[in-house]
Amino acid sequence: MLDALILASQQFLQPSVLLLMVVAVPIGLLFGVLPGVSGLTALAILIPVIYGMEPVHGLTFLLAAHAVVTTGGSVTSILLGIPGSTLNAATVMDGHPLSRQGKAGYAIGAALTASALGGVIGVIVLVVLLPFLQPIIEAFGSPEVFFLAVFGIVFIGALGEGQPLKGLMAGGLGVFLSTFGYQGTTGVPRFWLDSDYLLDGFRLVPIGLGLFAVPQIIALMSTGKPIASGGQNHDVSWAQVGEGIKTVVRRWRLLLGSSAIGTFVGIVPGVGGDTASFVSYGWAKQTSKNPDEFGKGAIAGVIAPEASNNAKEGGSLVPTLAFGIPGSVAMAMLFGAFLILGLEPGPYFLRDHMDIALGLAFVVAAANLIAAIMILPAVSHISLLTRVPGHVLGPLLLVLVVLGAYASANNPVDVLFVFVFGALGFVMTRLGFSRPALMLGFVLGSMIETYFEISLDAYGPWFVTRPISALLFVLILAGIAVPMARQMRRRKDHDHG
Amino acid sequence: MTIRFLPHLFTAILAATVLIALGNSAGAQSPDQYYEDKTVTFVVGFGPGGGYDTYTRLLAPYVGERLGATVVVKNQPGGRGMVALNQLVSGKPDGLTIMFAPGHFAAFAQLVGQEGARFDLAKLPWLARAVRANEIVFVSAKSPYRTIEDLANAKEPIKFSASQPAIILCRALHLNCKQIRGYRGSKQFVLAAIRGEIDAFTLAGSSARKAAEGGQIIPVFALGHQRSQYFKDTPTIFERGNLTAEQKWWFGLEDDVRNLGRAFVTTPGVAADRVAYLRRVFSQVLNDPDVIAAADKIKRPLSYLSGEEVEKTVGKVLSMDAERRRQVRDLLLSGRK
């Protein structure tokens, strides 16, 4: 291990590698800032660039760009209330209210620091776990993925912004929307209304853009007011940004916990990164002393999802490297890049190329730090966006949103559905239903159904008694019972007081 | 009056001449002139990054070079390639849209009358098959099975990751199988086999090669007539011998459909000379040693079959009698609720 570490530093601690990261990081950030355009698109566009590069250089370039996409996305989430990628949707809940209160610098400072440190922590956890990866992945079968997904669903109530019932209803609608198109296990299309588009069901990108961007654009254009008009006009100063950075360091336990959740979700193949930030958010809220502040601009609601978002990147490298089996679509593309560069991940990759694995982990960590260092000085300028009058900002955003929706799959129907879900999002914001809860329900709905059926087929009904499954089951029960107990106690205190 | 009429007549004649000349030139234009400086679209029915996408992007520049045309690749994901195929069927017959289609998947979809399949493969001009998967049956090292005999004598149901070849295999050999459905793509079921969640699965040799290195999944035999170039020691089911006529029919069907592989196809109604020209160009590209080497380098091996042969195989598969068709349909749809 030590040899590999030395070899890795020899290969990756070169000026040329660092320079490539400095080039790649702004590209990744840009993809993150653009709504609807995800890390996947970034990889697809960048892969042709690496032909002919040295393996170390090529992988550095791709991984650095990919690892920081969510960092860029956090900025749009906070400033504009539009998640730059669907992974940032959880950040909107508390990040955007802070912007409206004129505390954009504070929120962005915290988000960037959490992203950077989360990314680094994720990598450290990954490196520590490298020797034990195989047993970890082998322990996580379909039943465990199923329970993890259920675990995510439990947090839907917590996303309800103070109204758990409305959160549950929104989540239920999300689950319903996830049932459209091919059923996961039988391949029979449901509710497809004879339309080719619906064969695959609804897509995440139009849902995300529609729910979050369209209501925001409507508000901007109908009032004509800038985003930061609600509260007092704080100056977006360095002091504010510094306060954000300091807060993250002060809340180190929150940071560590969220990063651990992110890494864990990344490692388990099949759960998908979309869940990590929501689960962290829910966890942060449920363990908070003041859960009522969430949704109104609690800084913990920014730190938790952003830390876990970046932490999961380290985790999702694991199945790719350990088995040669990509953990996500993005990793599958990265896998293709390995082949182009003449490297082939497989069962022996970690044994034969531990240096490269460590080097890549280092790249992810360094890219996260570089990204934060690059954006932080510009935060005060970027935050001026919140002072732009709505009737100017609105149309600009509309153009970006339509472009982003189209670019995600080259499908004009996606653009149409941005507006369909936009109408839904508008109604939901008016009536106080949680949009992130809907998204989480949507993401987890089909996962729960599919993995439940696989578990049942492969293990029979007693899959619940597998050790890790049983543990997760207990945690889920606790996740439901503890907040209920706390609420009851508080109500009792209230009655007596 | 005559004088006023003359200019009109003159114009009319002129116009007619121009039109005839234009029509003639269009008719006389040879296919290689036609493609010169045109833009040809290669449609991929899947998202970026997967096998279909990688192959198409690999081949596009070579085909473009031979045609003298610009080839652009367009991803049109949806319905496992069927959405793009549905659109191709109603496309313009100008020969400028070419799809890299999942021939084997589409053939089964048409055979069983899958919802959403609105195409008739027999009516499409097939240009060439580029890729053929040599499907191999693997068992998990954590399963008690190692040989065909083990599988045939299994007391407990063999947990198979459901796929068309697996379903046909179980039926033909009368194996005691339990099809596990729901894995998204080969990566997931290979992992499931490594964990011991499933006992067996079928997968193209090229995709399984690396995962098999660690000994966690073990090849048992190859379906089809040819051994996989990556598993040369693994015998085929036909080599095993003593197959009944019925078994041969089922494995033959599997082999035929597998033969359609991933193939290039254009819109119906394209002029015959253009189709012939495109077939020639694809044959040159797919047999070009440089192209083959480039594909091997990224572990995406090519396997050419002429457009005529693909067409013949499509005809053979789709012309089975009604009774057989019913059997295939019942078998492949049996796991659905």
Image (spheres, rainbow, N blue to C red):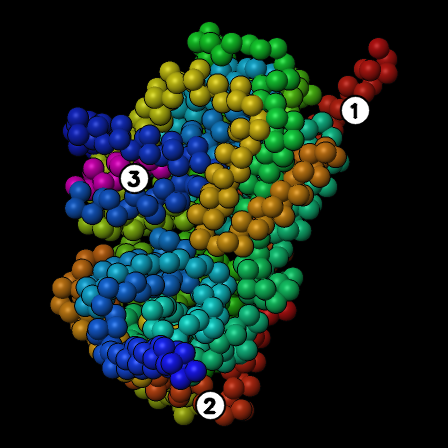
Q: Residue furthest top?
A: A239
User: Residue at point 68% right, 46% down?
Assistant: A173
Q: Using the image, tell me which numbered label, if any, was put on residue A331.
A: none
Give how far apart the Cα atoms at labels 2 and 3 are. Answer: 49 Å
Q: Earlier in the sequence, mark 1 or mark 3?
A: 3
What residue span does the magenta drawing correspond to?
A54-67
- Chain label for disc 3: A
- Chain label for disc 1: A
Can residue A57 be found in the magenta stretch?
A: yes
Image quadrant in which the N terminus of chain A is located: top left
User: Residue at point 29% right, 54% down?
Assistant: B214
Q: Using the image, tell me which numbered label, if any, was put on residue B320.
A: 2
> In the figure, residue B209 lies in which quadrant?
bottom left
Q: What kind of residue is marked 2?
A: Met
Picture coordinates of residue A102 (x, y %)?
57, 15
Q: Main secondary structure of the magenta part?
A: helix
Query: In this picture, is A74 found above or below B218?
Result: above
Q: Residue furthest left?
A: B289
- Classed neighbour count for the residue bearing mark 3: other residues with Cα under 10 Å, few (<14), some (14–19), many (≥20): many
Q: What kind of residue is marked 3?
A: Leu
Picture coordinates of residue B112 (x, y %)?
53, 78
> What residue does disc 1 label?
A488
User: Residue at point 81% right, 20% down?
Assistant: A491
Foreground disc of the pair 1, 2: 2
Give how far apart the Cα atoms at labels 1 and 2 are. Answer: 69 Å
Element assignment for label 3: helix
Query: In this picture, is B117 found above or below A11?
Result: below
> What residue does disc 3 label?
A62
Q: What kind of residue is marked 1?
A: Met
